[in-house]
Amino acid sequence: MSTDTPIEETPELRTDYGPNDGVLVASGLTKRFGGLTAVDDLSFAVEEQEILGFIGPNGAGKSTTFNCVTGTYPPTEGTVWYDGEEVTGDPAYEMVQRGLARTFQSFKPLRDRSVVDNVRTALVPNKLFSTKGLGGESRQKAIAICERVGLDDDLHRTPDELPHAGMLRLELARALATEPDVMLVDEPFAGLSGNEVKALSAVLEDLRANGMTLIVVDHNMRGLLSLIDRAVVINFGSKIAEGTPEEIRNDPRVQEAYLGSEAE
């Protein structure tokens, strides 16, 4: 009689997502650039008022997934649903109008304008123009958004006067100015100290507490796993694991592919 310990089978990853499985759903999402497959048959769903984490190293396909979902790139294959409606390939401006916003790793503020005027300009629908003539109501709204993300002491500074953490908050504020229901946040913890990660996490948790749904990508595993409700882990554009932070920490595939000694 064998005394060998049975090998635990890898749980099968769910792929059968449909339009009613979450507020934002992707099924069989694939994006090819010539002979390169950046996103490979990726399926996931994010539930309303959830904080979903996307984990993966550089080149894993995280930002390309964001670009396909938000309308920057049309997917090569697959389907995207937002709030139960198919939006596959819809342009980015339409997705913003539907209530889906995103932040970017590369900051492109209007450097000749103050922090509050950058946010005021983001309040203007569909096009950018001078903030001269925008009423006091828009200014008060921009100030409230700045306060919400912790920029209340920086209203009259220019973007170049902000530290890196301040630029991340300004990027978040500009996205908030579009009044999203769902926000995709790309690398919010990059370059931050431990205390800055905690402070920004508190901002994101407050947004969720006030009804927002968040999808967050970051390389800071400890910071991300402390924030999120659930994670999707991808490697070479494909999903290799998903689950709660505890399940992800203990998943040998994730430990091998991403976390290494950080998971120990």
Image (spheres, helix red, strand yellow):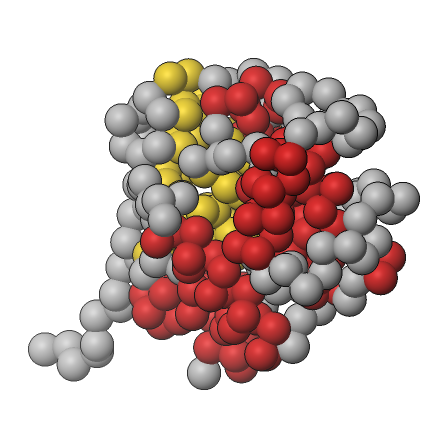
Residue located farthest toward the front when viewing the structure as drawn: 136
110 vs 218, left or right, is right
The residue drawn where x is 83% and y is 53% is: 158
The residue drawn where x is 57% and y is 18% is: 94
248 vs 123, left or right, is left
The residue drawn where x is 59% and y is 79% is: 194
Residue 180 x %, y %: 49, 35
27 vs 191, left or right, is left
Up-down: is 33 above or below 144?
Answer: above
Up-down: is 60 above or below 75?
Answer: below
Foreground residue among 146 and 81: 146
Up-down: is 197 above or below 234?
Answer: below
Foreground residue among 119 and 169: 119
Report the label total: 0
Q: Is residue 102 visible?
A: no
Q: Quadrant of residue 167?
A: bottom right
Q: Is residue 131 visible?
A: yes
Residue 92 x %, y %: 62, 23
Residue 222 x %, y %: 50, 73
Residue located farthest toward the right when viewing the structure as drawn: 112
Q: Quadrant of the N terminus?
A: bottom left
Residue 26 x %, y %: 43, 31
The residue drawn where x is 40% and y is 44% is: 212
Q: Quadrant of residue 155?
A: bottom right
Q: Quadrant of the C terminus?
A: bottom left
226 vs 117, left or right, is left
Up-down: is 164 above or below 262?
Answer: above
